Image (cartoon, helix red, strand yellow):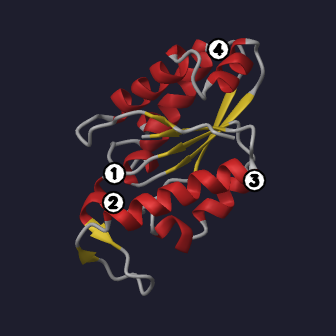
Amino acid sequence: DGQTAALVTTPASLTATALSTTIGEQVGAVRGSNLSRFITRAQSGENLTVTILGDSMWAGQTVTNPATDGAAILLAADLTARFPGTVTVTNRAAGGRTMLTMHTFSDVENALADKADLYIIGGGRNDALNEFPGGGGVYKEGYPRAGSMAARERVIRMIRDRVPKADVILS
């Protein structure tokens, strides 16, 4: 449909609070972008869903108490505070994931089944440091940028094809 995913830069040094605030501010402030559907619906008070794909940062493994301080939990609270409806966040992130391994572990298929209004695709340190050599669970050094970018593009295309009214943020 000619839309691209919104890109939110999130340096690895961001805390979970800063990460959720950055995403929340982006969603709350973007006008005239591909997030316009989500924003318009959120401002009208609709109850919306967000699904997150990512690594340990989004899974909450970088904080002391993921149940209260994880980026996904904070994001849900932040978006619900910004908009009149409820925003429910399904966090499908898991420690150690890369764009390449999300397909291997069925993360993408499970996320697509959510039929979310907004998908956040988080890539991080694992994408920068490791490559998954197609199976066996053995990581090796190196960063297959072309493979990782192709996997990210494939996830975006799958979302666009199967959940065409969803918006997408890359973080």
Is residue 13 placed above or below 57 in the rendered structure? Answer: above
Is residue 11 placed above or below 134 in the rendered structure? Answer: above
Q: Amino acid at mark 2?
A: Asp
Which quadrant does the C terminus fall into?
Answer: top left
> How many neighbours does mark 4 have within 10 angstroms: few (below 14), some (14-19), or many (20 or more)?
some
Q: Which mark is residue 83?
A: 4
Q: Earlier in the sequence, mark 4 or mark 1?
A: 4
Q: Amino acid at mark 3?
A: Arg
The quarter of the displayed image where residue 132 is located: bottom left
Q: Which mark is residue 124?
A: 1
Closer to the eye: label 4 or 1:
1
> How many neighbours does mark 2 have within 10 angstroms: few (below 14), some (14-19), or many (20 or more)?
many
In the rendered image, residue 98, in percent from the top left (x then y), is placed at 41, 62
C-alpha separation, residue under disc 2 versus residue under disc 1: 6 Å
Please give the name of the residue rendered at 55% of the width and 69% of the height, measured from the top-left corner: 103
Closer to the eye: label 1 or 3:
3
- In the rendered image, which residue does mark 2 sit on? 127
Q: Earlier in the sequence, mark 2 or mark 4?
A: 4
- In the rendered image, which residue does mark 3 sit on? 162
Foreground of the two, 24 or 80: 24
> How many neighbours does mark 1 have within 10 angstroms: few (below 14), some (14-19), or many (20 or more)?
many
> Quick one: SS at disc 2?
helix
Q: Earlier in the sequence, mark 2 or mark 3?
A: 2
Please give the name of the residue rendered at 61% of the width and 68% of the height, measured from the top-left corner: 106
C-alpha separation, residue under disc 2 versus residue under disc 4: 33 Å
> Quick one: SS at disc 3?
helix
Q: Are marks 2 and 4 in contact (CB under 8 Å)?
A: no
Foreground of the two, 110 or 15: 110
